[in-house]
């Protein structure tokens, strides 16, 4: 009888232990699941923060690129405006076809005439035509339109600062700026030849700004003009 009771008690304790073990296992499993869920939540949060940072950096890069493009567009527009000669439509103000004399050479050398002015001057290291010289270019363009048989040579010149190669290139750009302005006003490009002398033909020889300014010029020379 005692053996039966002992066996029953042992069996009861084993059942209790098994139940307790099951509870412990369930608790441990629940803890593991909660920890896994927490770690996953942390990973998701970190990934979301990473993606948000990437998006923020991409938006900032896009903004910088757009600003750079805008600055470049403005710079290109400013350069285009600087390169484009300042011109106005020709007017019949004494140099048009209605007032052409029988002797075009006499008209070219008339005292006080804009046609008697043959030089365009530039700022240092520049080749854009300044506003003050536009009337001279207009007058000669109008004269060439009235006399398509005449031709000119535009001679680009520089002061003596800079290398020979650089000054020759700059002088050519200065001569071309005058030709471009005249052709935009309607003059046949075949009437205009351009050449650069660089710093080889100075008209002033002092080493100061006054002399240098006189040498930074384009000269308009009429071909075959009587001496």
Image (tube, rainbow, N blue to C red):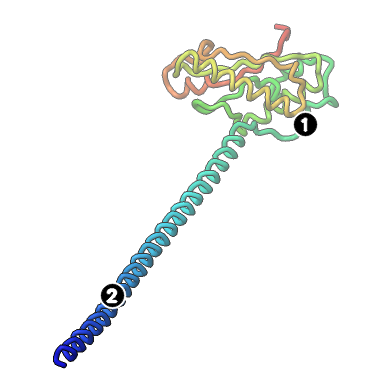
Marks 2 and 1 close (CB-CB < 8 Å): no
Question: Residue drawn at (61%, 36%), measured in percent from left and top?
Answer: 81
Give residue 194's position: percent from left, percent from top: 65, 15
Q: Tell me the residue that label 2 is attached to.
A: 25
192 or 35, which is in the foreground?
35
In this rendering, is residue 141 above or below 151? below
Give residue 199's position: percent from left, percent from top: 51, 14
Q: Is residue 103 left or right of residue 163?
A: right
Q: Is residue 18 left or right of residue 197?
A: left
Q: Is residue 4 left or right of residue 43?
A: left
Question: Residue drawn at (71%, 28%), measured in percent from left and top?
Answer: 138
Residue 135 in which image quadrant? top right
Image mark for residue 93: 1
Q: Secondary structure at mark 2?
A: helix
Q: Secondary structure at mark 1?
A: loop
Give residue 69's position: percent from left, percent from top: 54, 44
Give residue 43's position: percent from left, percent from top: 37, 62
Q: Which residue appears farthest toward the bottom when viewing the image?
A: 1
Question: Residue drawn at (28%, 73%), measured in percent from left and top?
Answer: 28
Residue depth check, mark 2 versus mark 1: number of the one nearer the observer: 2
Q: CA distance from mark 2 to mark 1?
A: 109 Å
Few, some or many residues within 10 Å of mark 1 (<14, 14–19, 20+): few
């Amino acid at each position: 009888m005692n053996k039966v009771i002992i066996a029953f008690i042992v069996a009861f304790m084993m059942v209790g232990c098994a139940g307790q073990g099951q509870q412990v296992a369930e608790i441990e499993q629940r803890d593991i699941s909660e920890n896994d869920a927490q770690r996953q939540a942390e990973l998701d949060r970190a990934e979301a923060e990473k993606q948000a940072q990437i998006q923020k950096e991409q938006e900032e890069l896009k903004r910088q690129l757009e600003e750079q493009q805008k600055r470049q567009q403005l710079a290109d527009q400013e350069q285009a405006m600087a390169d484009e000669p300042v011109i106005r439509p020709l007017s019949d103000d004494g140099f048009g076809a209605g007032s052409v004399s029988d002797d075009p050479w006499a008209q070219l050398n008339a005292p006080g005439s804009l046609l008697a002015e043959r030089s365009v001057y530039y700022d240092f290291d520049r080749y854009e035509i300044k506003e003050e010289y536009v009337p001279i270019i207009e007058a000669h363009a109008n004269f060439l339109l009235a006399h398509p048989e005449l031709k000119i040579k535009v001679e680009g010149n520089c002061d003596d600062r800079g290398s020979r190669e650089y000054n020759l290139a700059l002088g050519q750009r200065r001569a071309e700026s005058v030709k471009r302005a005249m052709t935009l006003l309607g003059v046949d490009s075949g009437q205009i030849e351009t050449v650069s002398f660089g710093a080889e033909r100075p008209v002033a020889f002092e080493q100061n700004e006054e002399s240098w300014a006189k040498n930074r010029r384009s000269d308009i020379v009429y071909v075959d003009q009587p001496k």
